[in-house]
Structures are given as C-alpha cells and as structure tokens.
Amino acid sequence: MNELVIPSPAKINLFLKVVGRRPDGYHEIITLLSRVSLFDTVSLSFDQPSISVDCSHPGVPEDRSNLAHQAASLFFNALSIRDGVAIFIDKVIPVAAGLGGGSSNAAAVLMGLNQRYGFPFSDGELMEIALKVGADVPFFLFKHAAVARGIGDDLEVYGDLPPFFVVLVCPGFEVSTDWVYRNLNLGLTNCEKNLKNCHLKDFSKIKGILCNDLEQVTIEKFPVIKTIKRGLLDLGAEIALMSGSGPSVFGLFKDAQQAAKAIHSIIRLRRRQKGRWDISLVELLLS
C-alpha cells in the first residue's frame, strides 16, 4: 500500500458564542459543530524522502506553514521516526471561508498516517497530536456533531441535530480568522444562551438559540453576508447563519426539494449582486 486517499469534509458552526479572551490570547468559545458533505480529497504517497505538500488551489501554502505538513511532522515526531510522505490536496472547500478546510486536511493526514503505520496511536492520542496542529483539528477526528468548548478542543457528542439539508453560499473572498478575533468587541456579543439542555429537534427553540458572535465583525466589513442570510431566510430556511469567522453562509432546510428550489433562487440573487459565489447543496454528516 503506497498510497491512501482520504475524504476531508468541511464543517459549519451552527452556534458560536465567544465567552471571553484568555491570558494567552486565545478566545474561549462555545460552539455547535457539524461536518457537511462538501469534501476535499487528501492523497498520501509513501516511501518518500521527506514531507511535501502539493495543492490544486494556488492560494494554499505548500511549505511547512500548511497544517497538513505540520500534522505529518508531528505524527512522525510522536512515533520517533524520520520518514516522509507526499501529500496532495485536491481542494474543493473554499479557502479562508469559515469551513475548516485546512484543519480537516490536517486531520485527514493524521488518520491516513495512523492507518499506514498500523494504528500506533489510540483515538485519544491522535487527538492530542491534532490539538498541537490547531484547535479545530481534533473535531475532524471526532466524527460526530459536537458541542465544543474552551478554545474548541473540549468536545462533547451532540445527538439532537435533525438531518437538515444545507444550502451553502461562499462569497468570492477570503476572511482572516485572526483579523476577526482581533476586531471583536466582547461587549457587543449577543449569543447569551448555552446549548445545555437544548433540544434542536424542537424547531420552536432553534431560532432563539442558533447565532454567531463573530458575525458582528465580518458583516460590518462585508455586508453582502447579511444580504445572503436574508435571501436564505426569505426562501424558507429554518436558520441562516455565517459559519465560523466567515464569510460562508449556510441555510438549513427540512427537505431536499425546498433546498433545491432555494439554490436556483440564490443563483439568481448572485447574478443580481454580480458576485462570484460558490453555491452548494450539502447535508449534515451526523456520524
């Protein structure tokens, strides 16, 4: 086995409350995460002299700053071996869009290497390695919808999500997560409710709970995000929110036909806005 191919899904944040800033500069959050059926593909070629990364997207770094490269390096260090792997990322998930593509790629590398080397690390040990790469990476090893706390690394299975269909709209520009958090005014955050004891199958409660504290920053600079949200709600979405630090926006729909109709309407809105939006119909990956 000289090559492995691993699907690498995107994620959305169905709730994101910023609790506060820690002394180390990280922000404490509470967020509800689900993977969605929008995939990059990560291919690993073994018996290589060193670690290398190649990506189909010209904007993705291919040096040691790439999270997939860091994941491979940390894996080999934890295994106390000097080995190499060629990593190719076929990029479908929009870059710097609040969908966790880079973190997902890193998790795919860790899963693939663990398989290649005979599963030397338990799930818990692999997640410890993943956390050294980035706070979002362990979630993609978790393989469940989850409530994440702390810096996003304290994960708890969340089993109450209905099987929504998701219209995902990614405006044609990138947003820096660091920039969003630097410009966040904690005094203006408004997601006051915790998810504890909340059952999302009760649609009457959803609209009062799902929110994203980071929207205040990103929408102020990029008001088209608010336009897309409003469009999705007008088309019957149960909820429309920005994912993560943006700029991607998702709408949750109860049935596929309604979601498909919304896609056609959003395409017309894109034409009117003269935008370069990526528009996808995906599903929540709940297990």
Image (cartoon, rainbow, N blue to C red):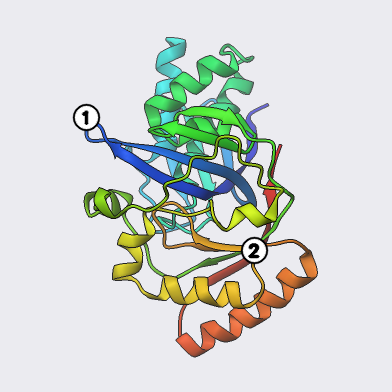
Three-letter residue code for mark 1 = Asp
Secondary-structure class at tag 1: loop
Residue that protrudes farthest toward the bottom in the picture: 272
- In front here: 49 or 230? 230
- In front here: 29 or 130? 29
- In front here: 276 or 31? 31
Instruction: Give coordinates of residue 246: x percent, y percent.
Output: 41, 58
Three-letter residue code for mark 2 = Glu
Residue 2 appears left or right of 136: right
Instruction: Give coordinates of residue 65: x percent, y percent.
Output: 32, 39
Instruction: Give coordinates of residue 114: x percent, y percent.
Output: 58, 21
Tell me the quarter of the image containing the C terminus. Answer: top right
The residues bearing labels 2 and 1 have C-alpha atoms spaced at a distance of 37 Å
60 vs 103: above or below? below
Secondary-structure class at tag 2: loop
First in sequence: mark 2 vs mark 1: 1
Local crowd at mark 2 within 10 Å, few (<14), some, or many (≥20)? Answer: some
In the picture, residue 112 is in which quadrant? top right
Q: Is residue 277 visible?
A: no
Residue at 48% x, 62% y is 248
239 vs 190: above or below? below
107 vs 118: above or below? below
Residue 230 appears left or right of 260: left
In the picture, residue 261 is in which quadrant? bottom right
Local crowd at mark 1 within 10 Å, few (<14), some, or many (≥20)? Answer: few
What is the total number of numbered labels drawn onto the structure image? 2
Circle on res. 24: 1
- In front here: 52 or 227? 227
- The residue to which callout 2 is attached is 238
167 vs 194: above or below? below
Of badges 2 and 1, the one in the foreground is 2
Instruction: Give coordinates of residue 90: x percent, y percent.
Output: 55, 51
